[in-house]
Image (tube, helix red, strand yellow):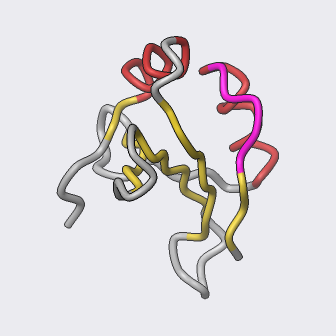
């Protein structure tokens, strides 16, 4: 269960206000080819908060290219990838 998540509309506002400290893309699990995007807000010790969709508690993408396109639409200029 995902405790705290962030919707893309909110993420776009936070990116424009320079509140996002770090962006990390990772796999849902080792056997799955789906990808997630999480952000760290505020302090370096803050936990990563995953992005959710309107319908699902966790938004996933089928490829890193798709994650990159989403990142561009919300104003994210770079992210790290954890394999």
**In magenta stretch: residue 51:** no
Residue 62 in the image: x percent, y percent?
Answer: 67, 56
Residue 57 in the image: x percent, y percent?
Answer: 28, 50
- Magenta span: helix, strand or loop, mainly? loop
| Residue 38 drawn above or below residue 2 | above
- Out of 69 and 3, give the one closest to the viewer: 3
Q: Quick check: 23 left or right of 2?
A: right
- Out of 76 and 45, give the one closest to the viewer: 45
- Out of 77 and 28, give the one closest to the viewer: 77
Residue at image point 76% right, 39% down: 78
Q: Quick check: 78 left or right of 58?
A: right
**In magenta stretch: residue 76:** yes
Residue at image point 61% right, 51% down: 61
Q: Which residues are magenta?
A: 75-79
| Residue 59 drawn above or below residue 75 | below
Residue at image point 22% right, 49% down: 4
Q: Quick check: 56 left or right of 83?
A: left
How many numbered marks have been drawn onto this rendered protein structure? 0
> Quarter of the image holding residue 82?
bottom right
Residue 28 in the image: x percent, y percent?
Answer: 52, 70
| Residue lying farthest to the right in this orientation | 65
Residue at image point 67% right, 32% down: 71
Residue 1 in the image: x percent, y percent?
Answer: 20, 67
| Residue 37 drawn above or below residue 81 | above
| Quadrant of the snapshot with the C terminus | bottom right
- Out of 80 and 46, give the one closest to the viewer: 46
> Quarter of the image holding residue 13?
top left
């Amino acid at each position: 269960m995902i405790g705290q998540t962030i919707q893309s509309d909110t993420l776009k506002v936070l990116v424009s206000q320079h509140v996002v400290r770090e962006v990390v893309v990772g796999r849902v699990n080792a056997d799955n080819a789906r990808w997630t995007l999480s952000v760290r807000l505020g302090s370096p010790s803050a936990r990563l908060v995953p992005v959710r969709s309107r319908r699902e508690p966790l938004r996933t993408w089928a490829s890193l290219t798709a994650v990159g396109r989403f990142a561009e639409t919300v104003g994210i200029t770079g992210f790290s990838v954890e394999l």
